[in-house]
Image (cartoon, rainbow, N blue to C red):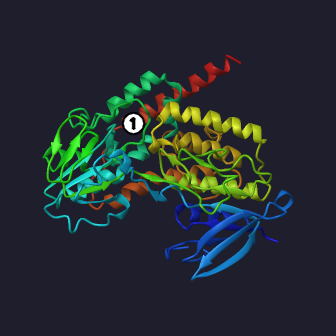
Amino acid sequence: MAKKVAVIGAGVSGLASLKCCVDEGLEPTCFERTEDIGGLWRFKTTVLSVKKHPDFSSSGQWEVVTESNGKEQRAVFDAIMVCSGHHILPHIPLESFPGIERFKGQYFHSRQYKHPEGFEGKHILVIGIGNSASDIAVELSKKAAQVFISTRHGSWVMGRISEDGYPWDVIFHTRFSSMFRNVLPRTIVKQMMDQQMNRWFSHENYGLEPQNKYLMKEPVVNDDLPSRILYGAIKVKSRVKELTETSAIFEDGTVEENIDIIVFATGYTFSFPFLEESFVKVEENMVSLYKCVFPPHLEKSTFACIGLIQPLGSIFPTVELQARWVTRVFKGLCTLPSERTMMEDIIKRNEKRIDLFGKSQSQILQTNYIDYLDELASEIGVKPHFLSFLLKDPKLAMKLYFGPCNSYQYRLVGPGQWEGARHAILTQKQRILKPLKTRALQESANFPVSFLLKILGLLAVVVAIFSRLQWF
């Protein structure tokens, strides 16, 4: 009989979890509060509580209580996948803004912002410098009289387009680049990042340079922000020190008058009110989970959090690998280590996170992208082995190492192998460019310099590997 799995949430993480449950022969039921898409879906259903079944120590089962249309229902499930994410509760730290109670204008969290209509001719203060803050500031600057964006620490800003017009993550997230960032001394990596981020424009000149620019914080991706700042539609300000009835006083002593609206783009907090606090505790906006997925203290590994993470890359491949691993743990095909080993891993991971990303609340869930994907893939047995492919399929090996790292790479071997993965990897750049090539051009006969650089890079990798082997 197929195990019954409760999937809480029908967002990106929930959809991936449903698919992986079906792939592994499990029977998922998805609970979603809203009317948005869902599987075996129960729309407009709120999960009230998730508790251990009385015989949990032997069965690993859970009692789930839900409410829909005013009626409560109870059901027993063999496993739980919490997929509600971390953008749950809007975070507005009003205590950090003295005078907010006197402010006569309107203020709200960025989650409430929908469109720029109704903001015409207003003086607007956006607090925060993340992607939401930047997107909102840029959009409002086309309607408002003036937009100010207030930041405590600054941020790197980059465009979506990178080398040769490819999306930035296609160029940035390669195994070759990741290897160099891991093996080079941190000081060199920091200098390279500084130069790369300032290649588009000087962040210092625009007042955006991060306070601690050598932390590996997630950059803001916005094509329009620098140009809107350049001609004055957006003005970058320091931290808000105090608010009056109509003005904002900033940390540097400057004052902006006649502020009509304040948008708090100050992030989110997350919580799990339906869970027993004894086994999943949220402390300082952080949950202690083994590999960001499993609580380490449970007798049975039948509970997992999917998507409670913020990778420096796409969330889709990340949650898919999490869900693939979790469903195989539920089936007993993968096993978890001892509680002690899991706790040691959690502590070590947290120390590394702080070293790389800092202690800021916005970086609590941050993790390296390819390193984390490979870590999950190793648990499942689907991590591609570069040297193996180099010997039997050099063309594919080149794409694996120098091309973008995505989900296809984790469908080449092991459980869930897909026969179309190789072709998808070899043709992914052509598929990226195809929609752009709407004008026929004569192909250039120039020798691709990038190919020569890849060959030299590959030789460097081989030399590094053999040099390392000599130490053993």
Mark 1 — residue? 450
Q: Residue furthest top?
A: 471
Residue drawn at x 38%, y 45% as measured from the top left: 168
Q: From the viewer's side, name the closer residue of 231 and 317.
A: 231
Q: Is residue 89 left or right of residue 248?
A: right
Q: Position of residue 209 (x, y in %)?
A: 29, 34
Quadrant where the image shows the N terminus: bottom right
As rendered, which of 389 and 75 lies closer to the eye?
75
- Inspect this view and state whether residue 14 appears: yes
Query: Percent position (x, y) of residue 27?
Result: 72, 71
Query: Would residue 92 appear left or right of 340 to someone viewing this image?
Result: left
Q: Nearer the viewer, residue 432 or 83?
A: 83
Residue name at image x 35 percent, y 58 percent? 109
Q: Is residue 342 above or below residue 461?
A: below
Can residue 227 be seen in the rendering of this structure? no
Give the quadrant of residue 288: top right
Three-letter amino acid code at disc 1? Ser
For this orientation, the residue located farthest to the right is 58
**Mark 1 Cα-neighbour bin, 10 Å: few <14, some 14–19, many ≥20:** few
Q: Which image quadrant is residue 383 in?
A: top right
